[in-house]
Image (cartoon, rainbow, N blue to C red):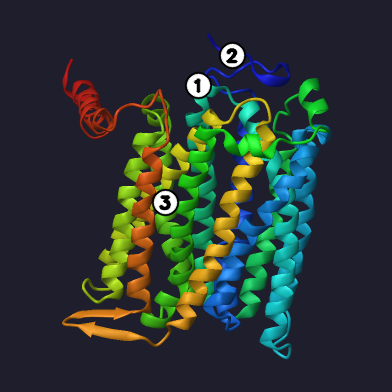
Amino acid sequence: MQLPAPSGKTPAPDGLPEGISNAYWFQVFNSASFSMVLGMPMMLFFKHLGASATVLGIVQGLPALLNILQIPAARFVEQVGYRSFVLRGWSLRSVFILGLAGVAALPASVDALTRVALALFLLFCYNFSRGISVCGWLPWITQLIPEQVRGRYVSMDQTFGFGAIVVTSILAGFFLKDNPGGSAFAVVFLVSFLSAVGSLYYLKRIPDVPVAEEARSRSNEPVPWAAIWGYRPFQRIVLFNCVMLAGWAGGGVVSVPFLRDMFAVKDSTFMFLTAAWGSVYMVGVYFMGKQVDLAGSKPLLVNSIVWQVAHFGGWGLIAAGITPFAWWTLAIQQTTWAIGLALFSLANTRLLMATVPVMGRSHFFAIHSVVTSLVSGFSPFLWGLLVDSSKGWHHWIGPVHLHTFSVIYVLIMIVVASSLFMLSKIEEPKAMPADDFFNEFFIRTPVRAFSRIFVKRWMP
């Protein structure tokens, strides 16, 4: 039986509510915008200003740290309404993007330290408004999308989002290649502002969902945070995410200094590399959307960890001089990261949506985001300190070159691999056993696809 869509909307034939296409287009413009402000261009801009790895760690950690604002903001979501709450925060943060473009456009007579300070302040303001408003997004979408098609929705949502990131990265790469310098980043951030304005148009058109009177009245009651954290299935997912994100933080901090300092990789090349793994990611989540609804989340998460271990281990081999820094090794690295991240993002989001109870949903999502964000926020800072404090250290063991970057990539690989232990504690009753998933995904599905093509082409 098909569930009715919220707000009196009749579901589309695929089970998704009417008007959901606006959410996809919102994701296109939103992803294009934040990929420039919170992604590689901002890291490259700070590196252009001469920022250290510790400062880069702060830049990477700010969005996560300020997600702690979701805790006090969560009680106001039901009072204001989901769409209104998110719309106000998204509108405010767009203003700060324009300020960042102004900082990048400052003349060379303004010293780099002043520009770093101004950019950090505006980034703080941007992430402050984002940290408050983002707590309304997942409760809104979880109530809007029926449970049996959430995997499909997440798949399409991320396909549209990463499609925008790929296109944006390619265009930014060509632009930065032909226009090096601080003024080029001003143009990039201005485009980010215009994209943010476009996202607001579609955000206003996403179907809203009514807030139940019971939920509205409960929003004024004291929140039982201890009871929320004590819900064991939810707690285990949070701890699993914390271990994974601690490893990712190291990869995010070390990538720019590693490739810039050791191989003199240009800004435009960084953007092309982002586009490369984003393209593979986009294809991956599109084809895995239905699979995760059938198989469950845990089999995909196991797969994700395997791919990520291979990815960070690959960077370790390149850093140690065991494998060369070449286009074919870069292709392997971008592919392993894209597949690992696609599997994780799709399965982890679906698992969280299925585990969080209906009552107190906003607070569950808020505490998940805050706890994981504290890990994501402080970890880059610690990884950055490790990079800066060990700079210049190196040691040869035969042909193997041990130095700061090669050792850190091994440490990241160990942290990510250890998340398998936390994943084993998570219970998902509807999940397909891992052996059945591998058989279905890698053997039966390709065979069925080949059979359909063969029959259609050669049989009368």
Q: Is residue 307 above or below residue 144?
A: below
Which dot marks residue 148? 1
Numbered marks: total: 3
Circle 1: residue type: Gln
Calculate the distance from the C-alpha at mark 1 to the C-alpha at mark 2.
9 Å
Residue at 73% across / 20% down in the picture?
7
Q: Which image quadrant for residue 44?
A: bottom right
Q: Secondary structure at mark 1?
A: helix
Q: Earlier in the sequence, mark 2 or mark 3?
A: 2
Q: Quadrant of the C terminus?
A: top left
Q: Is residue 319 above or below residue 86?
A: below
Calculate the distance from the C-alpha at mark 3 to the C-alpha at mark 1.
27 Å
Given this view, does label 3 or label 1 mark the residue nearer the observer?
A: 1
Asked whether, in this view, residue 336 is left or right of residue 47, the answer is left
Asked whether, in this view, residue 274 is left or right of residue 307, the answer is right
Q: Which residue is mark 2?
A: 3
Q: Are marks 1 and 2 in contact (CB under 8 Å)?
A: yes
Which one is in front, 58 or 32?
58
Circle 3: residue type: Ser
Q: Which residue is mark 3?
A: 279
Q: Which image quadrant for residue 65?
A: bottom right
Q: Earlier in the sequence, mark 1 or mark 2?
A: 2
Circle 2: residue type: Leu
Q: Is residue 336 above or below residue 122?
A: above
Residue at 33% across / 26% down in the picture?
432
